[in-house]
Image (cartoon, grey):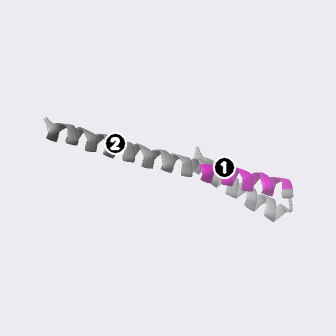
Amino acid sequence: MSNQDRFEGKAKETAGKATGDEELEDEGKTQHAKGKVEEKVEETKDTAKGAFEAAKDAVSSDDDDQS
């Protein structure tokens, strides 16, 4: 949903600027920012998951080497 929020937010922001509707512009900015934050959260989760898997694999290979 983060991409959708980003794009819809940018569209609202642009429409608000074009029509002088500050409320719509602000709503768009907020929605766009929310989408960017959600995207960063997902990236962070993916990075953490990858690091966890790498650490788990390293521990498993160390255990195999000690047997």
Placement of 29 over or under 46, stated as above or below: below
| In this view, the mark in front (1 or 2) | 2
Question: Residue 8, percent across and down?
Answer: 67, 51
Residue 64 percent coordinates (x, y): 16, 37
**Main SS type for the magenta part?**
helix
Image quarter (top left, top right, bottom left or bottom right) of the C terminus: top left
Task: Give the labeled residue for mark 2.
Answer: 53
Report x, y in % for residue 42: 51, 46
Q: Could you give the CA–CA distance between mark 1 and mark 2, rounded to whole angstroms?
A: 29 Å
**Quick one: 64 or 4, which is closer to the camera?**
64
* Residue type pointed to by label 2: Glu
Other-residue count near label 2 (Cα within 10 Å), few / some / many at <14 / 14–19 / ≥20: few
Residue 10's x, y, as percent?
A: 68, 58
* Amino acid at pointer 1: Lys
Say left or right for 35 vs 18. Answer: left
Among numbered discs 1 and 2, the one appearing first in the sequence: 1
Label of residue 34 in the image: 1
Q: Residue at x 74, y 61 (%)?
A: 14
Q: Residue at x 74, y 58 (%)?
A: 13
Q: Which residues are magenta?
A: 23-37
- Residue farthest to the bottom, as pictured: 18
x 38%, y 47%: residue = 51
Q: Is 6 or 44 nearer to us in this picture?
A: 44
Q: Is residue 16 left or right of residue 62?
A: right
Q: Are marks 1 and 2 in contact (CB under 8 Å)?
A: no
Q: Is residue 20 left or right of residue 40?
A: right
Q: Residue furthest top?
A: 67
The label on residue 66 is: none
